[in-house]
Amino acid sequence: MAGNKETEIMLSDEIIINKIYVIRGKKVMIDHDLAELYGVETKQLKRAVRRNIKRFPEDFMFELIQSEFDNLRSQIGTSSWGGIRYMPMAFTEQGAAMLSSVLNSDRAILVNIQIIRVFTKMREMLEAHKEILQKLDQLQTKEVEQDEKIMLIFEYLKQLEQVKQEELEQSKRKRIGYKRNEDE
């Protein structure tokens, strides 16, 4: 039993969530962070991936381009990568799951289970809040429609004011032409 406790890895969901980024519209984890969680060097993780590249199609893993990497570094606020030779790899949920099969250690398997659970919780939370998001979207749409109606009312008021102003100017104009005695 004691051996089982030693291999049990306890990472909080928050630690994992803080290592999930949205890049190219996908929730991903970066090789550097995954290597840290799995307790291996980043170059060891990358080597295992490159040796098993057929297991990692683009919807499982992709390499960042320079602008994505720069954006990521600015989000994090500090560079914990130091001088890197190769752009980081980004792993989707499926890619992170595949990593446990190529790293093949007890720690990788346990950490991977936690990562999959966090991704699942995130999906469930999004699904649960989907209705709230739809209601907010509907309210925003109604607000935009109300704003447009209010702007239309103001436009009508401006036009009405302009017509009244023209009528007032017209009535104040000196009349020309035939004048009756009463008009003088």
Image (cartoon, rainbow, N blue to C red):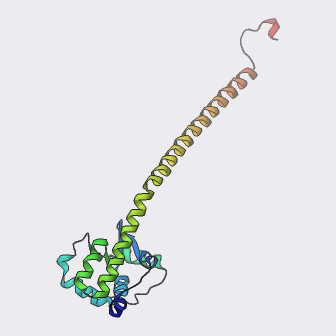
Residue drawn at x 30%, y 77% is 96
Task: Please say whether residue 92 is visible from this viewpoint.
Answer: no
Q: Position of residue 111 (x, y in %)?
A: 34, 82
Q: Residue furthest left?
A: 54
Q: Nearer the viewer, residue 16 or 86?
A: 16
Residue 11 horizontal/vertical position (percent): 42, 82
Image quadrant in which you'd find residue 24: bottom left
Q: Position of residue 9 (x, y in %)?
A: 38, 86
The percent position of residue 157, horizontal first and vertical second, equals: 64, 32
Q: Residue at x 30, y 85 (%)?
A: 108
Q: Is residue 142 above or below residue 131?
A: above
Q: Is residue 82 left or right of residue 54?
A: right
| 170 sits to left or right of 16 | right
Whether residue 30 is visible, yes or no, is: yes
Q: Quadrant of residue 48?
A: bottom left
Q: Please state which of residues 65 and 28 is positioned toward the viewer in this rendering.
A: 28
Quarter containing the N terminus: bottom left
Q: Nearer the viewer, residue 101 or 87?
A: 101
Residue drawn at point x = 55 percent, y = 41 percent: 146
